[in-house]
Image (cartoon, rainbow, N blue to C red):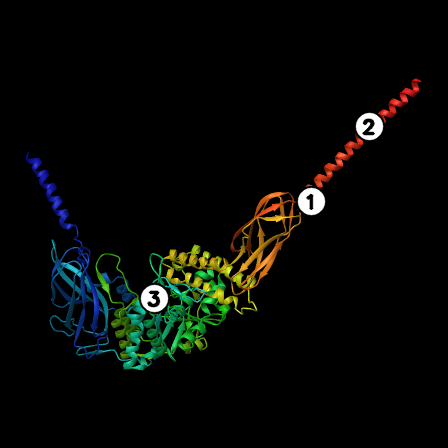
Amino acid sequence: MTDRLRRTGLVVLTAVLAALVVPLPSAAAQQSGRLRVDLDQLLPRVVDAAAQAITVTGRITNTGDRNVEQIEARLQRGAVLDTESALRGALNDPQKTDAVNRPQVSSTFQPISDRLDPGESAEFSISVPLGADRGALKLDRPGVYPVALNFNGDPEFGRTERVGALSTLLPVLSVPGGGAVPPPAAPSRLTVLWPLVDDRPRRVQTPLDGTPPVFSDDGLSSSVSGGRLFNLVDAVQRAARSNAAVLRSLCFAVDPDLLESVQVMTTGYRVRTADGRLVDGSGGRAAQLWLDRVKELTRGQCVVALPYADADLAALSRAGATTLQADALDVAALVETALGTKPLAGVVWPETGTLDARTLGDLAKLRRTTVLVDSGKLRDTSGAAPYRLGDNLNAVPHDQLIANSLSPRTTGDDSGVKTSSVQNGLATLVFRAAFQAVPGQVELVAPPRRWNASGAELTVFLQAIESLEAQGYLDTLGLQSLVDGAEQGQAGGVDYSAADTAAELPSSAVAAVAQVDATQRELTSTVLFEDDTQLVQPDALVQPLRAGLIRASSAAWRSTPERAGAATNEVSNQMSALLSQVTVTDPGRPLSLASADSPIPVYITNWLPVKVQARINLGSTPGLKPEQQIVVQIPAKASLPRYLPAEVTRSGRFSVDIWLTTEQGTRLGGTSRVELNSTSYGSITLAVTFLAAGVLVLLVGLRLFRRIRARRTAGTAVTDQL
C-alpha cells in the first residue's frame, strides 16, 4: 500500500514538473487582436531637434464578439534598426519586432475608453515625451526606430491582455540635447510616381448607335467624388497650394482608360445594375471637377502613360497578342488630348516591377523603351541609371525597399498588429537619404499602383518630402532627364521568377482574348471596307471592341481571372451583335425551280455603315449541287439580291440552309432556311432516262432481229423439204 502511494505521488509530481517546464505561450499568441486600430495622425513624422513629444491620434473599433473594458494605451519602442536587412525584417513581420514583444522603452499607460461593445468605436489621442524623463521614449541617438502603440484591455470573461496594436517605424534625424545627422553634400535626387489608376476597368459597352456608354457599376463616381482617386488628387492640390515646388518631385502615372472613362462620364453614361437593368449614372459633375483638377495639376509636369486599362503586357506577349499589346501602348495622343500635356515617350511601368525577356524584346521592337523596374529585379549592374538592357531598351530602377514599405501589410497570424504604410515609407526614404546616403543617388519611389492611403496620410507624405527637400536631405529629379538622356550604366538583365509568371493572367483567359483579337483584325483587313455613300471608317466600328478587349486583359484581373473571362465574353457578344447586322433574308415562301439549272434567289441585308465582303454558304442537301466559294460585297445600309447557281438532280420539295461567313469562316448573322420546289429533271435523271430508253430500244431491236431470223430459218427448212 505504501509503495503504491509512493508511485502515485511520483507520477503526480512528474506531471506537475512537466507542466511547470513547458513554456507558456507568448503574449502575442495569447491575444487575438480584438481591436482594429486606425491611425489618423502621428506627429512628428520625422523627429528633429525641434520635436519634444510624439502625439498619436486615431480610432479604435471593437471587432471581436465580446465587450472590452478598461482600455488603455502606451507607446513602446525597440532598438535602432541600423541595417537594411533589419528594416526589411521589421517591415515584413511587424508583429515580431522588439517594439511589440520586447520593448526596450515603454511609456506609462494612458486611459482610452471605459468600455467598448462589439462594433463600437472610440477616438484616442496619446502624447509621449521624447527625452530621457521617466515615461518618455528616451530616444538616445539618431536612426530609424520600431515603435508600437499597444492597447491593453479586459475582454468579457477574460483577463487583461493586449487587445490591439499598431506598429510603425519612426525616423529620427536628431535627438533632444544633441546628436544629429547632417544633410549630405550631394543629396539624393527624388522622383515619386503618383499613380492615377482605377481599381479595375468599369466600361463594359460603348454602343455604336450613339447611346451613352455602359459601366459595370458606379464605383468610379464614388472614387472621384470623395474616395480613393479624389484623395490622390486632393492631397497634391493641397500640397501645391502651400508650395508649388512639390510638383517637381512628382511624376503622374495615369491610365488612359481612366481618363477616357471619366471624360465620357461628363456627357452622360448608364450603369448596369445587379439584375441587369440599365440606369443613369450619377457622377457626371464629379467626373468633370476631378478631370479639371487633374488637368491643372499635370499642366507642364511629368506624366507617364500606363498601358491602356493597365493591360497585362507579359500575358499578352506570352499569348502572341502583340498587336493588342502595341495598341495598349499607343496611347500618347489620347493622354495629350485629355490632359493637354504630352507624356514621356516610351516609358513602361510594369505591374510588378519586372517583365520577362520575351515581353522586353517585343517592347524594344515597337519603339525605344525605358522600363521602370524593381531595383531588386535588375541584375549585374554597373555604372548608374539609366542602364542599358539591350538595343532600343533601357532600365531605370525604382527603390524596392521603399516600394515594399509603402505596400500595406497583412499579418500572417491573428495578432491584430496593424501598420502604417505611409509612415513606413517615409522612414525608409529617410533611411536612404540620411543614413545610407550616396552622393547624387537616384531615388525613384513607386508606391502601390492602386494606392489606397487616406487623404490625410497622403498629405503628410507630401509635406514630409517637402520638409526633407527644404532641409537639404533630398533634391528634385526630373524623370525626363533619365528617360531622354544617354545610358550611364549597363545591366545584364531583369529577373522574372516563377512567382512572377504565376501572377500573370492565366493562359486560358489570355487565349480567349487572343482569339477574339484575331477575329477583330480579320474584320478590318478583309471584311469591312469604307463605303462611298457613308464615309465611315471600319476602324470606327471595331475600335470600341478592341478597347474592350484590352480592358479584358487588364492586370487588375490578376487576382480574379474569372472577371477577365466575363469581360472577354462581353466583347465577344458585342462583336456577334455587330456581325448579326449582315445576314441572309428568308423569302418567307417556298421557291419554285423551273429547270435543272435554275438559280436560287436570296436577299442579303447589310445594316452596317460600311461595305462588307462575305462568302455565301449553302448546306448539304440531297438533290442539289450548289456552286461553292461564292463571295459578294454588300454595300452599306443596303439589301442585295443574289442568284446562286445550282444544279438540281431530282424533282420534289426540299430545304436548303444558307448563311454568310467571312472568307476565314467567321459567321455573319444567322442561318436562313429556304424551301424549294423542283418540277424539272436534273442531268443525272435525264441521263438515266436516256440510258433506259436506249436499252429498251436495243432490247426491242434484238427481239425483232431474232423473230426475223427465226422466220427465215423456218422458210429455208420448208424449201429444203420440197
Give the spatial CA distance, label 2 vs label 3.
Answer: 99 Å
Q: Identify residue type, mark 2.
A: Arg
| Of residues 439 and 13, the one drawn nearer to the viewer in this rendering | 439
Residue 506 placement (x, y as % from top left): 41, 56
Q: What's the mark number on residue 281?
A: 3
Residue 399 placement (x, y as % from top left): 35, 70
Residue shown at the point (82%, 28%) measured from the top left: 706
Give the residue at mark 1.
Answer: 683
Describe the element under mark 1 as helix, strand or loop. Answer: helix
Q: What's the mark number on residue 706?
A: 2
Residue 315 placement (x, y as % from top left): 44, 60
Give yes or no for contact between labels 1 and 3 (Cβ–Cβ under 8 Å).
Answer: no
Q: Identify residue type, mark 3.
A: Gly
| Of residues 605 and 93, the one drawn nearer to the viewer in this rendering | 605
Marks 1 and 3: which is nearer the front?
1
Give the spatial CA distance, label 2 vs label 1.
Answer: 34 Å
Badge 2 density bin: few <14, some 14–19, many ≥20, Cα 10 Å: few
Describe the element under mark 2 as helix, strand or loop. Answer: helix
Q: Residue furthest top?
A: 721
